[in-house]
Image (cartoon, rainbow, N blue to C red):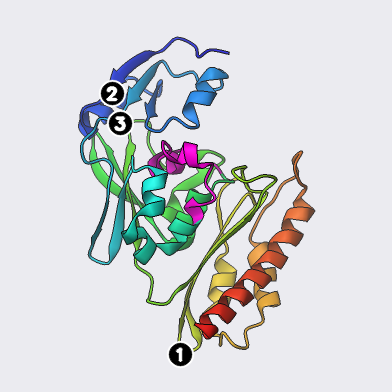
């Protein structure tokens, strides 16, 4: 199939892009990597009247450090994230998650802003941002704002972004030194969307869990944060924690569904077992290090 007719605009600045979004009142789409948008256009599942190309905007891509955070510009390519030493050092869970994102070829074009903007519930980046407590930096004609990731995902493929608002960066706060980073997923083939996916960051000091972030993908209509399991971990000894019990709490916060690839029962069973196993392995590796 071919895309339906649309107008094409090239934005030279962020302000120009959001002005175009406002001018076209919900009938516009932003083009960055295009790895999801272009197939949707071809299938006529997306029918924007105007396509706004943001690839030429200076300063919208790049990775920087400051004030205990790592800032990643919206049009930063996924392969740049994968190979960046700042990400490897300060946001290792994001680097690990990127290895599961699509394929090498698509990662050359795909962007972090595009992934967060789409908010695919079975994708790696939205759940990673949720687990790590990221903030979404945006701009609209009314100015700049930051959206806490807990307030960002509103429903299936639905976010807190206004129609005239675009993501400009994703900000990842630092976690304590030595935090365990876990990314694990089950998919039919490498590069497919996950049937079950887990992202976790677990901070341990003097053998005690002091902070926890647990995110799931492919386990509901949005990325899901296991708040009860996070709270239950805090203050427990890593050597004696009841991981089976924590896993049951973690999976209880999910809301998996049946589809042609797997049913909800499979997703719950696999997710619970994966959680207990990979967290136990990660704790053991930390002890041995």
- Quadrant hosting residue 175: bottom left
Give the residue pinned by disc 3: 55
Judge from the rendering whether residue 142 lies leftward or rightward of residue 202; answer left or right: left
The tag earlier along the polypeptide, 2 or 1, is: 2
Give the residue pinned by disc 1: 206
Residue 36 seen in this snapshot: yes
- Quadrant hosting residue 111: top left
- Quadrant hosting residue 33: top left
Which type of secondary structure does the marked residue at label 1 adopt?
loop
Which type of secondary structure does the marked residue at label 3 adopt?
loop
Write the start and end of the magenta stretch as one range: 97-120
Residue 148 seen in this snapshot: no
State the separation of the CA atoms marked 2 and 1: 53 Å
Given contact means CB atoms under 8 Å apart, are the residues at marks 3 and 2 in contact? Answer: no
Given contact means CB atoms under 8 Å apart, are the residues at marks 1 and 3 in contact? Answer: no
**Residue at 38% of width from left, 75% of height from top?**
176
Q: For the N terminus, which image quadrant?
A: top right
Q: Nearer the viewer, mark 3 or mark 2?
A: 3
């Amino acid at each position: 199939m071919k895309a339906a007719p649309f107008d094409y605009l090239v934005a030279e600045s962020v302000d120009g892009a959001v002005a175009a979004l406002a001018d076209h009142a919900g009938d516009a789409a932003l083009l960055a990597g295009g790895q999801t948008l272009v197939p949707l256009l071809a299938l006529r599942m997306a029918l924007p009247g105007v396509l706004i190309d943001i690839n030429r905007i200076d300063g919208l891509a790049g990775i920087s450090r400051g004030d205990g955070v790592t800032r990643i510009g919206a049009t930063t390519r996924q392969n740049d994230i994968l190979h960046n030493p700042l990400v490897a050092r300060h946001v290792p869970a994001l680097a690990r998650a990127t290895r599961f994102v699509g394929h090498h070829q698509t990662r050359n074009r795909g962007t972090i802003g595009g992934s967060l903007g789409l908010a695919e519930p079975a994708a790696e980046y939205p759940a990673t941002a949720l687990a790590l407590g990221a903030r979404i930096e945006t701009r609209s004609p009314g100015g700049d704002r930051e959206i806490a990731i807990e307030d960002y995902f509103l429903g299936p493929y639905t976010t807190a972004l206004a129609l005239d608002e675009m993501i400009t960066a994703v900000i990842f706060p630092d976690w304590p030194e030595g935090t365990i980073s876990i990314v694990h997923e089950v998919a039919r083939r490498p590069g497919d969307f996950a049937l079950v996916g887990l992202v976790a960051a677990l901070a341990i000091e003097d053998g005690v869990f002091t902070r926890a972030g647990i995110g799931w993908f492919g386990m509901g209509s949005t990325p899901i944060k296991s708040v009860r399991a996070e709270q239950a971990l805090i203050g427990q000894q890593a050597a004696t924690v009841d991981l089976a019990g924590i896993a049951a709490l973690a999976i209880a916060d999910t809301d998996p569904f049946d589809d042609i690839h797997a049913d909800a029962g499979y997703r719950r069973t696999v997710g619970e077992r994966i959680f207990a196993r990979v967290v136990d392995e990660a704790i053991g590796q930390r002890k041995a290090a």
